Image: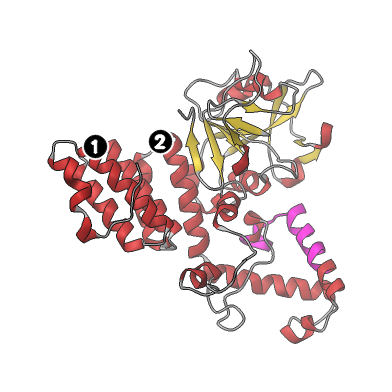
Amino acid sequence: MGFRVVRPNELEWITRPHEAGEPARAVDYLLEAAKQGRERWAKKEALDLYAKALELVSEEQRRLRIRLVRALALVELSDFAAGAAELDEILPSLEGSDEMEALFGRARAAFWLGDTDATLGSAERARDLAEKLGVEPTRESIAAVSSDRLLQAQVELSADVFGHPDPVRWGEAAANLMPFEPVIDGDVLPARPIDRIASGAGADVDVMVGTNTEEERLFMVPNGSIYHITEDILAGTIAAYYSLSSEPDTHGLVYALWKRGSYVLLPLLRPDADLDWASYEGPDSLRPGPRGLAEPSEPPRGMDAVTRADLVLVPALAVDRGGLRLGRGGGSYDRALARVAPGIPTIALVYDGELLDEVPADGHDQRVRLVARPSAGITRLPLI
């Protein structure tokens, strides 16, 4: 059955099931219509539909889920302050995948609410760049440098941030690993591009190339903007991994979790392809490992250390709708996942096209309980 976006004065048809004694059906209709409104940036209509759905629901867990969806919609529609406020209200009552979705949404809101700090940070990066170039930190001086030398200096400065992401020196760039970000200056960039596009700028452009919403969501999940979440929320033991270049980046996330007080474990690949674990103690604690991996240099904690994790992040080439993951063929994570308790969230980070209907599986293959994708955030598995 298809749905159409409705306005508040057109709600009669969609709430008829409630009047006929079928409130659950009416709520489902309202939430689907609100989702379509959100996708079309019809903010007021979407919020009115969420409010009507809440009026029809008395069960507390369902109300919490609707409030979470509404808060994430506010963040998606760029009302970051309102979205952050609602997420702060409901986070203490959430758990499992709902809590994780809320944490990532709150991180995204915090990232954009920090625009002033980001602008000041960008000015600091300009000064650092000028030092690399050996010129005065002014627009005119930097503009006079050749493009080749400018790009070389940017690469050098980025390497400094990646190699030694010290938050005292680099500020937010130490967490999001983006030393160069656009600055809203009222002239070259008068407003955030997403706001300008939403208001109609570029409507006559046939093809627009750039970072879209899905890519930005993926960036916000693993990269380190979660650095803004409080220590109390992130306290606990997290078994993570240091991503390869072909995988969704986890380097900033690992650093951010560690800086916020989480006890972060990273894998050590054993000669028998099983996984030992050791603590991450900052970027300088890593060393080159086998198969191009970076691994911690701290003492091994044992293969069973993963059993003490409160959350496990898992790499995957693909995941299917039943939760089976396609790894690199060594069975390392299948053995590790077999040691994880049933109630512990295990999340595979993949790109959108890597959630498949089915992946090849053997009898020893272990399932993950959640998958994180750029377009859909965190999804509970299995998907029926």
Residue 354's tag is: none
Q: From the top left corner, tell me how far across and down residue 84 is, in percent.
A: 40, 56
- For label 1, the SS is helix
Count of numbered marks: 2
**Type of amino acid under label 2:** Glu
> Residue 136 lies in what quarter of the image?
bottom right
Q: Earlier in the sequence, mark 2 or mark 1?
A: 1
Q: From the top left corner, tell me how far across and down residue 99 is, in percent.
A: 43, 40
- Who's the residue at 44% across and 34% down the image? 96
Instruction: Identify residue for label 2.
Output: 95
Q: From the top left corner, tell me how far across and down residue 258 is, in percent.
A: 61, 44
Q: Examine the rendering and report whether any part of residue 89 can be seen.
A: no
**Type of amino acid under label 1:** Ala
Instruction: Identify residue for label 1.
Output: 24
Is residue 317 shown above or below 229? above
- Who's the residue at 25% across and 47% down the image? 53
- Who's the residue at 83% across and 31% down the image? 290
Quadrant of the frame with the N terminus: top left
